[in-house]
Amino acid sequence: MTKRQIISKSVNELLSIDSSSELYNQLISSNIGLDDINWFVDNKKRKNGEVSSEDETINHISELFDLGGIITGGSALAYITNKFFSKDLDFYFNDKLAYLKAVILTLREPTIDINYYIDDPCELHDLSIVMCGLKKDGPFITEACQRALDIGISDLYISHVIFPERTAIRMEKYNKRLGIKFRFHEVIAFCALYNLNPQNLLSFCI
């Protein structure tokens, strides 16, 4: 079983929580609102049409960091480089109870996504340029990300791709925002595997 499959299995098990589980009892004894807990247990999705105020969102972000959450990806890269803006936040957790608390805390937060990881919050990113993050005590940059920033060339991890069209869009985005290039042979292999037109990406290649 691959790491992605293990993570997917863990998330599916966590999201199938019901009122008879031990995790439910742990949630009840926490400071999470009971109405939100029960709504999530019954519906397993965000509260559509209900959006937190700006102050509530700020408080939720602080609580997510307190739970051990780590922001990685584009929003972390935006903070570190200070060269573009990203409104969406991807928080990562590797503690089951903290993950569930985070999911419930963000029921009214459409711009915050909650993810689960095993060893490293950047372990399944498809581009090395976004392998950086923000913890409660500050930012961090992986060697792969730093190398991409230093030389202007990002690795493309084809085995980590889930939605190839979205990967292609991100490649274009970071080329426009930061001038990031990609290796020709990796792009050709990526396009061949997912039946994409390489012409759309060749201008980003070296």
Image (cartoon, rainbow, N blue to C red):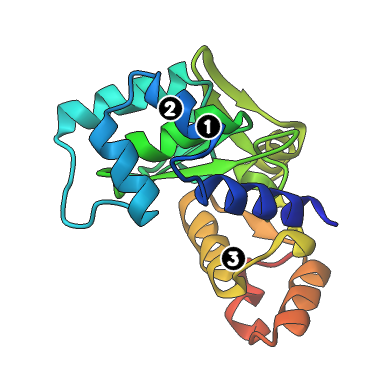
- Which image quadrant for residue 190? bottom right
Dot 1: element: helix
Nearer to me, 132 or 59: 59
Quadrant containing the N terminus is: bottom right
- Residue type (three-letter) at the residue carrying disc 2: Leu
- Cα gap from disc 1 to disc 3, whole angstroms: 35 Å
Q: Position of residue 74 (x, y in %)?
A: 49, 45
Q: Earlier in the sequence, mark 1 or mark 3?
A: 1
Residue hosting label 1: 23
Q: Number of callouts in the render?
A: 3
Is residue 81 visible from the viewing direction of this image? no
Q: Residue at x 35, y 52 (%)?
A: 42
* Front disc: 3 or 2: 2
The residue carrying pointer 3 sits among few (fewer than 14), some (14 to 19) or many (20 or more) residues within 10 Å by Cα, namely some
Dot 2: element: helix
Q: Which of marks 3 and 2 is nearer the N terminus?
A: 2
- Cα gap from disc 3 to disc 2, whole angstroms: 36 Å
Residue hosting label 2: 27
Q: Where is residue 165 in the image (x, y as percent from the top left)?
A: 56, 74
Q: Position of residue 79 (x, y in %)?
A: 44, 31
- Residue type (three-letter) at the residue carrying disc 1: Leu
The residue carrying pointer 2 sits among few (fewer than 14), some (14 to 19) or many (20 or more) residues within 10 Å by Cα, namely some
- Residue type (three-letter) at the residue carrying disc 3: Thr
Asked if the residue under mark 2 is in contact with the one under mark 1, i.e. CB atoms within 8 Å, the reply is yes
Position of residue 5 relative to residue 33, above or below, is below
Residue hosting label 3: 167
Position of residue 89 relative to residue 187, above or below, is above
